[in-house]
Amino acid sequence: CAQDWLHFCFSRAAQGESLDELFGLNRPKGRQPKPETSVKHFDIAVAVVQRMRAGKTLAEAAEEVGGQFGMYESRVQDAYAKYKSDAECSLALEGLLLNDDCTP
């Protein structure tokens, strides 16, 4: 079922793995970041994407999210740039899952 597979992928992504890697789109290179840092930066990117979908500019979203996470706007924008596609994919798939009629 699509829901089970997506749940598996996103649970692994929450542990720090890239969705691109989980979907087989690229291979990791070089030193990998700490999982807790990756999760935090992913969460930051999701928060920025949500605010931008609500009509905020990147600068406005970064300022709000920076205040929420206790980070400088520039660091928020760095996290957004790195995890933007994963965050957008996560939110899109979350919307699909909410409408999935898959029964266990």
Image (tube, rainbow, N blue to C red):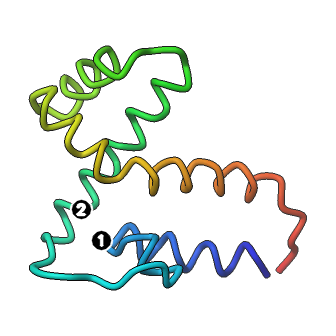
Q: Quadrant of residue 57?
A: top left
Q: Amino acid at mark 1?
A: Gly
Q: Position of residue 69 (x, y in %)?
A: 20, 35
Find numbered disc 1 in the image and state the secondary structure of the residue it sits on.
Answer: loop
Give 30 or 49, whichever is nearer the viewer.
30
Q: Is residue 25 left or right of residue 80?
A: right
Q: Quadrant of residue 75?
A: top left
Above or below, 19 against 46 in this view is: below
Q: Residue at x 28, y 60 (%)?
A: 39
Q: Quadrant of the N terminus?
A: bottom right
Q: Quadrant of residue 4?
A: bottom right
Do tag 1 and tag 2 residues touch (Cβ < 8 Å)?
yes
Give 48 or 100, whichever is nearer the viewer.
48
Above or below, 2 against 82 in this view is: below
Q: Residue at x 29, y 71 (%)?
A: 16
Q: Pick whichever of labels 1 and 2 is earlier in the sequence.
A: 1
Q: Residue at x 21, y 36 (%)?
A: 76
Above or below, 19 against 74 in this view is: below
Q: CA distance from mark 1 to mark 2?
A: 5 Å
Q: Amino acid at mark 2?
A: Ser
Give the label on residue 38, or none. Answer: 2
Q: Position of residue 91 (x, y in %)?
A: 57, 48
Q: Residue at x 75, y 55 (%)?
A: 96
Q: Position of residue 32 (x, y in %)?
A: 15, 77
Above or below, 21 against 61 in this view is: below
Give the label on residue 67, or none. Answer: none
- Say which residue label 1 marks: 16
Q: Position of residue 29 (x, y in %)?
A: 20, 82
